[in-house]
Amino acid sequence: MKKYIDDFTNNIKKMFTKSEPGNEKDKVTGSTFKEKFSNIGARMKKTGSPLRMGFFATYETVWNVILFFILTVSLLGLLAFSIGLGYFAALVNDEEIQSNEELEVALTEMTESTTVAFGSGESLGTLRADLIRERVDSDDINPYVKDAVIATEDEHFYEHNGVVPKAFMRAALQVFAGGDDSTGGSTLTQQLVKNQLLTNETTFDRKAIELLLAFRVEKLLDKDEILEAYLNAVSFGRNSNGQNIAGIQAAAEGVFGKDAADLNLAESAFLAGMPQNPYAYTPFMQGGTVKDEEYLQPGKNRQEFVLDRMLLEEKITEEEHAEALDYDIYANLTDSVVVPNQNYPFLTDEVERRGVQILKYVLAEEDGLTREEVDATPLINQDYTEQANQALRYQGYHITTTIEKDIYDLMQDVKDSNFYYYGDRSSEDAIDADDSDAEDEVMQHEIGAVLKENDTGRILGFIGGRDHDESSINHATQTSRNVGSTMKPLITFGPALDKGIVAPDTVLLDEKFEIPELNWAPANYDYEEEFGLISTKHALSNSYNLSTLRLWADVREENPREYFERMNLPLQEDMNPSLPLGPNDLSVEQNVDAFSSFAQDGTMTEGYMIESITSPDGEVVYEHEPVVNEVWKDSTAFLMSDMLTESFQTGSAYHISDFYDSISSDYDFAAKTGTSNSFVDSWFMGYNPEVTLGLWMGYDANIPQVSGYEGEEYLHIYNWRNLTQELLALVPDQMGRGASFQQPDSVREMEYCALTMETESDCEENLDQPIEGLVAEDTRLNDKSSLNDPEIQSRMGAAFDSGLSNSSLRGVVTNTYDDRYRVGGSSSSSDDDDDDDDD
């Protein structure tokens, strides 16, 4: 039998195989057609029926064609694979290879918003960012969440090695077809790589790198670590505040008001379905309001799909599936989310603002640009400001501030519970209101305060305002207002001491005058009052206007602007006659800086709030360096403080003299009050050798705080007292307990004539009489022949008062309320006539 089969097979092969040359056996024999036909017939008879012969011939032909096609396709496929592999290798050839440690850090340590710490060490929280994320460990994530994500996003998660082969083929075909990587379907590992390591560009370069990194990640991390990292990285849309959120913990808190560990099945499925299209499935609008019902349906449909997948993958039972579908997901949304910076809105705003300003110069310096180059070019400045803003919010910097938490908290508590305020007012009450169509706005009475450590410049605490929701303006650092009479020591009395024009007991004239060319006749706060001859100390501590302006007529010729330049503070260009009364604008922080210059022997250490900024990798990119400015002579600082101490006793702060008396044995405070025109702004600046505490009150518009009400004009003074009293109880040593102003060698006590500013030996009895008082070593004491001496006339305001009479320079001098004496003696009528002739 076997022999017949072999013969049959051999014959079939012979029929369809080209014979070798010279093979006579395969030739059709016969000399005539009839013989050849008979030969063919015999051969077919031997083979069998024609049908069988045709079948086998067709079979062999088709099989050969199939084999040829398979071989061709295989060769083409191998060629394509080789080209693709080479192309893939070329794409990833220039990719920087991270170490395993670097890769693990990049994957598992999420880049979050910048964190901020108080100067006292406590954490303030994170700065506001467009994206809120809070990392959570795998053990603190409900298993339902993990099962739901795997069932929906990557059902073969525990089986593949990071990449599903069809994903690579699909990406290749898309590129060769001219498309992009938009079909989705990446594994969880690839999605993690894309979120944490790559950009969002949809190029094949990025896809190739993604695949390569996915293989590495699978070898570096186990599956649970990959899943944990993914759930911490992926976007979940918005929370109930309308903020963008990422990570399952922020999603659980932001959507349902609970931790990720406490989510139920329905909530887990809802959140697990969101990463595919987070902003379509989130229930919240940008402002935090819940979407209309029709726009909530996609999220509900997606949740049902996730539950169906979990059931199909046997992760839940039919009963659990039905129960989860019946759960009213939208009835259990949270109303709002408490984020760390909500407790400190003014502080958070200020740290953000200062952080951006600092970081922009850091980034510019890294690019080889100087601060001057950045400031000189608005477009460059804007570019680096934007870069710094983005970096500060998303690159995980750490900022250490100077703010002491207990001090800051106390200042807010006192502001809220132990301050006095005037009532709400209409914006139409502003002194500069016009008849425009602007809508009337109700404004609350505002407060701004700053506490600064004089020696270091550290801002220990501040009050930005009463209620951030009502007014987010920082009234301590960002609002510049008329400084009122707090300008007097800075622009008039300070320079006068420093130039040697006056000493504390130098006699000034407090008498009305008029400047006709300006149509201006200034007056004291009590309009009808004139106080005659008074000491410099008395004029300043009681904040008299007329004597100050007369002295200003002399001082303004001595370049007082230089002192503001030394303090790096703004000063209006015009040295007009009213400048000492406070038309210049400063913030509370700037005014505190200015007064702190009197506390530290004439030097001013500029205030600051950011101690350091550290990059995510621990590098200190910024560390504050003190800026110390030499402003006044040490004699000026001491004599100024000596004069301003009088404010509490008999001066403009006498309303809290009992408080001062109760602390004066332990604390050496000096102070200056100030109010601007129409009582729009009120100030209290108090300092001792250790700290300066400045306070401002007013409205956001130029609204008079009171009008015609007796006894209501001192709230700023009482509030400063209340705040200081609480601070002394909290941190007595930091507030300067035991510290006192030390008299420098450049100041001495001597007898001299304070009206004519002569030494005792040069005094003429008919003009002046010697008194004992403090003077600086360079106080101008020289012999004068008469009251017409240019130095005396200038000090008495002759430049403003063309009708100045020497008779006004005789009489009783008020050195203090308890110390008065007479100058000029008894003069004859001829003396007066001579004086009048000389005026």
Image (spheres, rainbow, N blue to C red):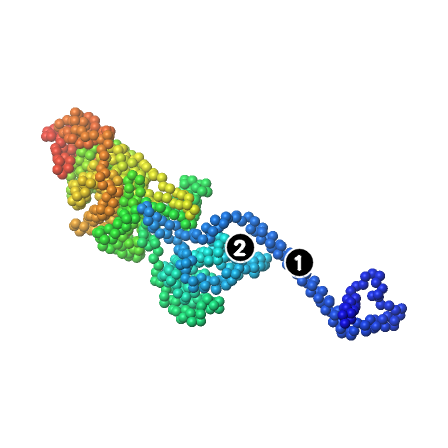
Q: Is residue 97 visible?
A: yes
In the rendered view, does 200 fall on the left or right side of 21? left
**Coordinates of residue 777 in the picture (x, y in percent):** 23, 29
Screen quadrant of the N terminus: bottom right
Q: Is residue 582 visible?
A: no
Q: Which residue is mark 2?
A: 215
Q: Earlier in the sequence, mark 1 or mark 2?
A: 1
- Amino acid type, callout 1: Leu
**Coordinates of residue 12 in the picture (x, y in percent):** 77, 68
Q: Which residue is mark 1?
A: 75
At numbered mark 1, what does the secondary structure look like: helix, strand or loop? helix
In the rendered view, does 217 fall on the left or right side of 806? right
Crowd class of label 2 (few under 14; some 14 to 19; many from 20; radius 10 Å): some
Residue drawn at 35 percent across, 46 percent down: 400
At numbered mark 2, what does the secondary structure look like: helix, strand or loop? helix
| Residue in front for this viewpoint, 659 or 231 | 231
How far separated are the C-alphas under marks 1 and 2? Answer: 27 Å
| Numbered disc in front, either 1 or 2 | 2
Screen quadrant of the C terminus: top left
> How many numbered callouts?
2
For residue 42, above or below residue 768: below
In the rendered view, does 718 fall on the left or right side of 80? left
**Coordinates of residue 776 in the picture (x, y in percent):** 23, 30
- Amino acid type, callout 2: Phe
In the rendered view, does 414 fall on the left or right side of 19? left
